[in-house]
Structures are given as C-alpha cells and as structure tokens.
Image (spheres, helix red, strand yellow):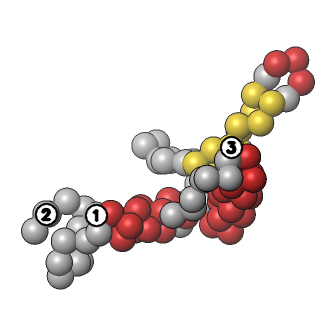
Amino acid sequence: MCDCIECVGYSREPSDDELDAARYRWLRKQSKEILSGKIDVVKWVAGENNTLYGKALRMTTLDSVIDSEMMVAIKEQPFFTAP
C-alpha cells in the first residue's frame, strides 16, 4: 500500500479515478485568502491591448467553468469522451 498523501485513509490502493476525485475536492475547498504556497485554478481571459487577466476559480464556480469547457470540447470533438 502506498503511503502518499492521496492514499491516506484508504483501506486499499485507490483507483486513479478516486485519486483524481480527491485532488479535485481538495482544489475546490481552497481558502479565498491569499497565502504563500497556495495552489489556485485560474481561468485566463484576453483583455484589451493584448493583455490577459486571471480569475481564481473555486467551489461551484470551478465546477461550472469545467462543465462548460467540457461541453465545448464535446461539441468541437465529436469523439471526445468525458471521463
């Protein structure tokens, strides 16, 4: 049995899907505070004068953006299969 942080609490070796889900849950619940070493999911958007700006995504906003982007991928690539 692996002793990495993702596997702690499992009574058996977790599947890749279980590990992905655990990582996603961890990302979703990150604090809104700005902290050194913090990991954020950011959506970059084109602004005026060839600039980019980013918006940190958390909780239901993160879910909605991922769902929306997955739907775009499915429409653009008919053979794309969502996990």
Instruction: Please identify the quarter of the rendering in which residue 3 is found.
Output: bottom left
Q: Position of residue 37 (x, y in %)?
A: 43, 43
According to the image, label 1 marks what residue?
Answer: 6
What amino acid does circle 3 point to? Lys
Q: Nearer the viewer, residue 82 or 25?
A: 82
Q: Earlier in the sequence, mark 3 or mark 1?
A: 1
Residue plotted at (68% across, 68% down): 60
* View extreme (top): residue: 49
According to the image, label 3 marks what residue?
Answer: 43
What amino acid does circle 2 point to? Cys
Q: Secondary structure at mark 1?
A: loop
* View extreme (bottom): residue: 11
Figure quadrant of the N terminus: bottom left
What amino acid does circle 1 point to? Glu
According to the image, label 2 marks what residue?
Answer: 2
**Does residue 31 appear in the picture of this structure?**
no
